[in-house]
Image: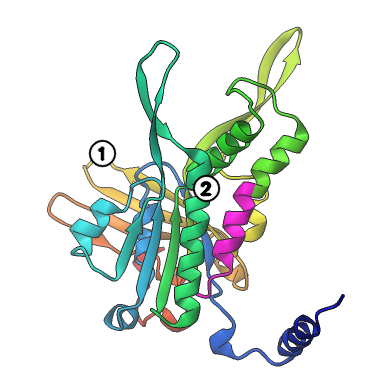
Amino acid sequence: MSDPFSEAQDALDIDAMLAPTPREKAGSSICAMLVGSEDSLKSGIAIDCRSKKQIEDHEIVFVIDLDNANLPIWKEHWDCSEDIRLANPAIMVTRKQEDGSEKIEIDYDRTIQRINQLIFKVKEAEDSGKFKLGGFIFDGVDKLLSSAESTMRTQRELDVDDGVSFQYWNIRKKLFVDVVFAVKHLHCAKYFITHTKIYQKKKIVNGKEQVVKEWTEGIWEKSMPNELYQIIDCRKEMYPDGNTEYFAKVREFKGRPGLIGKEFKTMRITADKYTFYGMPLLRDTENVEEADYTEDLF
């Protein structure tokens, strides 16, 4: 039997989709991935996602911090601001090993569940107006991928070294992508962070395995780039004079193709001081303040 109430609600939803979208309800045009090796300023750039006005208005930055990378930044550079909320949803358990010893490890299945619960609660708070969300950061996409795979292996009773059939890899993909989709449904600016690793393509030549191609890429599920509006490659340069500079290069920026390929200086450290520039263009246009960029940052 059909449900007249549900059908009426569906009709209202469709009518709302057909109506003009108010700018304030359109959602953020920022859904960025920051990619780079350890200590390339990825977390520092992301946590600086608000304009001065947003900070003055106490807009909230919520960070799912699977890497525990943001605590020192929050304490040293943000004076433990209550407007920056850090949460590491990893659930640790103690398990006995075959030799009788105990080992502390992550409960991946429950951790994935808790991540989804956190995102749901943030979305609920944002929609209800409980707080104004200036940005949402998911720091540790590489660990999310590991959690999704470990959950899949646990569900299918597969050991770490066991081969995995194609259908089981689809389970891993769904666990990963469900989290990404949940984050994308937030109204605010969204930032994902992951490390890089070296990938290799090999083939047999004259009976021996040889590397025919080698490249560095972010650690993520292979469909991840399709879900992003911006991809930013972060790096650090250390010079013989003892100075250090950090850079961020635009690999992808939907809606602003003129930025693709441009590289920006994000921080400079000398013997007596450091200057943090961040990357303000990773904010919605209305939150990029005047003089955020000067020629010496390119």
Quadrant the C terminus occupies = bottom left
Looking at the rendering, which quadrant does residue 260 occupy? bottom right
- Foreground of the two, 20 or 86: 86
Q: Amino acid at mark 2?
A: Ile
Q: Is residue 237 above or below residue 160?
A: below
Q: x, y (%) of residue 27? A: 56, 78
177 in the magenta segment: yes
Which residue reaches farthest front?
A: 1
Residue range highlighted in magenta: 175-188
Give the residue at x 38% y 13%: 100
State the CA–CA distance, disc 2 to disc 1: 44 Å
Which residue is under mark 1?
Answer: 240
Q: x, y (%) of residue 281? A: 45, 71
- Foreground of the two, 193 or 169: 169
Q: Is residue 243 above or below residue 290?
A: above
Which residue is under mark 2?
Answer: 112
Q: Tell me the mark number nearer the camera, choosing from 2 and 1.
A: 2
Q: Alpha-carbon neighbours of circle 2 within 10 Å: few (<14), some, or many (≥20)?
A: many
User: Which secondary structure lies at badge 1?
Assistant: loop
Q: x, y (%) of residue 297? A: 37, 64
Magenta segment's dominant SS is: helix
Answer left or right for 220 relative to 55.
Answer: right
Answer left or right for 188 relative to 149.
Answer: left
Give the residue at x 27% y 53%: 71
Looking at the rendering, which quadrant does residue 204 occupy? top right
Answer left or right for 290 relative to 169.
Answer: left
**Is residue 136 in view?**
yes
Give the residue at x 52% y 50%: 113
Quadrant the N terminus occupies = bottom right
User: Which secondary structure lies at badge 2?
Assistant: helix
**Is residue 284 in view?**
no
Q: Amino acid at mark 1?
A: Pro
